[in-house]
Amino acid sequence: MVRLPRRQLISALAFSAAAGSVTLRPSDPFISAKVSRLVPDPFTLGVASGDPWPSGVVLWTRLAPEPGEPNGLAGMARRSFPVEWQVSEDAGFRTIARAGRVFTDPNWAHAVHVEVDGLRAGATYFYRFRVEGHLSPVGRTRTAPDLLSKAEGSRFALASCANYEEGWFTAYRRLAEDDPDLVLHLGDYIYESPELGQPGARRVRGHEGFEAITLADYRRRHAQYKTDPDLQHAHAVAPWAVVFDDHEVDGNWAGFHPETPQPGFAGRRATAFRAYYEHMPLRRRSLPRGPFMRIYRRLGWGALATVHLLDTRQYRDDQVCGDTRAVGCHARLAPGRTLLGAEQERWLDRGLRASRTRWDLLAQQVCMAPRDTSSGPFGAYALDGWDGYASARRRLFESIVSSGVRNPVVVTGDVHRHYANDLALDGRTIAAELITTSVSSGGDGSRTTARIDVELAQNPGLHWADCRRGYVALTLDANQLRADFRTLPYVTRPGAPATTAASFALQDRRRGLARIA
């Protein structure tokens, strides 16, 4: 990958959103054009890019001068606005690679999604927007390597579960400082419901409003998260590929079943999907249609890696029992149940069989490895994850084996802990699972707990665990995938440093994780 010298990167990312404060090129018409300002600064939510391909990438912003407005319109008039955009090969915007103009739609919250094409593969670019005389912050992005590129030393980052109320988003800042080529966000980007009143909950800072149910609620919640400077910084340094889990809609929802019975859940699901699309750098093919939104998709990263982004929420065929210790719940573990849905299962199987890349990453939301944490007659399994769909998990494992895929690796979020797992079929290790802890959910956490000690003792495929907050940094080359589990000592106050708690490696064509630090 082409990497920008650190000094130039810092200079680029320091650009202000205010057009008047950009002084590098006062003769630049993009900056100096005399346009009357009809609204306050509309770029309060920053910029983002995502879903890169070899010749392009999605660019995103949303016009939101008043992001906290209860009506969800963020202070924008109910009319269309022309938004100009530029993509440059340099941070000073001296060499413009692509430029254009789009018109916002007030029905879609004045969100901007630009699918820029015609760029060089495996290259670094800078981008910005302008509307009504206001200039956005500058973002940096990268296109995917071409299909034959070895893309040695590529760096991915894994993140999940950022609860605004339970901690600061310092992990996003530290993740950005690691300079990833691509960020995989594995779900729970927002939390729909305040945590106050839940056992052990500690509010560090507050959500605006109450539980998100209406479209205005979800728009306001996304906007509040997007105003966080650490999150904005992480979006501005690299492209992201995102998938949702449960809290983008409703805690522990499955298919068309909410966690607790409520009327009109299909409508709520549609509303949440709409707001999610409005705030994410997704391609048009992910545009929601009512209560349906296709987020499972595939990204190529040269000859080095294929990322299969999965949806483990939308296509479940049964409601999961919320009490993981209740004996009656285990009657639900019937053969033939599906977590991915039949169509997505077939899509994934075809993708694995067709893959010719060195590494195949299955990016998904809920723990895939069995997690027995009890010595009782049934154990205590997380039935909201793959443990509740044992037959579907077996089908997936059999697909991994029969496809002959070279190096399968599952990457997971959701559980607010770091885990390093081996995955086995009939006693034979077939893949690895790397689980990232939360960005802030759960508060500060600790190195270990009594429950973790039980899990380590009772699950032979589980190598290591940590209960602090953080993220996972992956480095990939032709011979090895390295996973550095990064942790923060606290998130209940800002500014924590990040350290590597453990490092594991996978060698090409060899199954099973090996601890290297």
Image: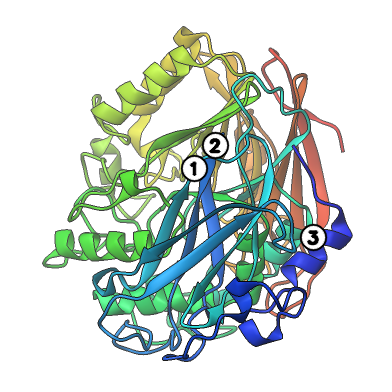
Quarter of the view holding residue 94? bottom right
Q: Residue 117: which numbered mark, if any?
A: 1
Instruction: Tell me the residue that label 3 is attached to.
Output: 9
Q: Earlier in the sequence, mark 2 or mark 1?
A: 2
Quarter of the view holding residue 275? bottom left
Label 1: how many residues lie within 10 Å, few (<14), some (14-19) or many (20+)? some
Q: Earlier in the sequence, mark 3 or mark 1?
A: 3
Left or right: 340, with 382 as reference point: left
Percent x, y of residue 428: 58, 13
C-alpha separation, residue under disc 2 versus residue under disc 1: 5 Å
* Residue at 42%, 65% in the rendered image: 279
Instruction: Tell me the residue that label 2 is attached to.
Output: 55
* Residue at 38%, 63% in the rendered image: 102
Amino acid type for the residue under numbered disc 1: Asp
Contact (Cβ within 8 Å) of mark 2 with mark 1: yes
Label 1: which secondary element: loop
| Viewport quadrant of the N terminus | top right
